Amino acid sequence: MALLAASENLIYFPQRLDPADRQGILARYPGVVEVSITATDGVRLHGWHVRGGTGSMRPLAIYFGGNAEEVSWMLAFAEVFAGWDLALLNYRGYGLSAGKPSQQALLRDALAIYDHFVGQPGIDPARVITVGRSLGSGVATYLASQRSMHGVLLVAPFDSITEVAQNLYPFLPVRLILGDLYNSAALAPAMTAPLRMIVASHDEVIPAQRSQHLFDAWGGPKERVTIAGAGHNDLQQHREYWQAIRDFLRR
């Protein structure tokens, strides 16, 4: 167990947010609401809520970022989600969220985040999607396996972090060391929510077969979009990436 905990720590690269930047963010984005959610174990999760309009039954997108991602950067692209409420919560230890990240904690927190926002006035529980990028694809897939989803959008996803690591280190006993981390492929066959998968043509982090395995295993309707010329960390620099998200939301 100690070995697993130590090795899992290698997965996360928490990016903190200077408390002084908090006021700057609120000043730059006056329509954004600061959010603080108490997790089931009492840890405080911090993030942002962008309202998509004034309607009484608004759709909601819940975003989960990568393993080295502080999610406030997404506020600059909130217009991509026009008409949708957007929930951006930092993982434990990221941004201004307290605690320390682990698979168990992040998956549990995803349920708390969903339950918090679906319980808010004006949110339509029948029109909730989850968006997960890289590490966040594992969190988003788990959430979709536990809560009703109108759709799932996975960006640069993997079938299992353990399988990704095994590909990188084929001569090491990776499965023995890591255990079974973020095994989305095991959950995928039971999925009924529509999936849009966005992948980079030159992803240097997630091997193409790891994304393809997850796609093939998905039980619900699915489509795959490849962003030509993109790598794992620069998808957001491609106009086609944001257009693929817009198209999915408009459906």
Image (cartoon, rainbow, N blue to C red):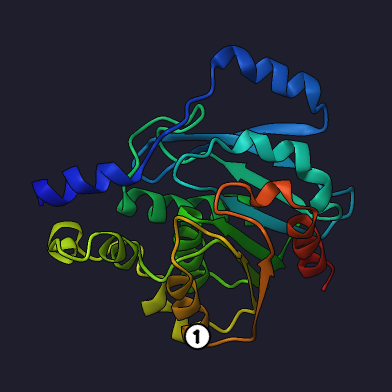
Residue drawn at (36%, 63%) of the image: 182
Q: Amino acid at mark 1?
A: Asp
* Residue 197, image quadrant: bottom right
Relative horizontal placement of residue 34, taking residue 82 as reference (left or right): left
Q: Nearer the viewer, residue 130 or 118?
A: 130
Q: Is residue 110 above or below residue 215?
A: above
Decide: few, some or many residues near mark 1? Use Cα within 10 Å; few <14, some 14-19, many ≥20.
few
Name the quarter where the C terminus is drawn: bottom right
Residue 186 in the image, given as x and y percentages of width and height: 36, 78
73 and 127: which is toward the camera: 73
Farthest residue to the right: give it. Answer: 54
**Residue shown at the point (89%, 48%) measured from the top left:** 54
- Residue at 51 percent across and 29 percent down: it is 95
- Number of numbered discs visible in the structure rendering: 1
Residue in front for this viewpoint, 72 or 61: 72
Q: Determine the residue located farthest toward the top in the rendered image.
A: 20
Residue 174, quarter of the rendered image: bottom left
The answer to whether one can see residue 63 in this image is yes
Q: Quadrant of residue 72?
A: top right
Residue 166, percent from left and from top: 26, 65
Residue 121 appears in view: no
Residue at (84, 68) in percent of width and height: 250
Q: Secondary structure at mark 1?
A: helix
Position of 212 with respect to 238 (left or right) is left
Instruction: Give the percent coordinates (x, y) of residue 217.
Output: 46, 85
Task: Tell me: residue 90, above or below residue 53.
Answer: above
Quickly name the residue at label 1: 216
In the drawing, does residue 161 fall left or right of residue 169? Answer: right
Q: Position of residue 205 (x, y in %)?
A: 44, 55
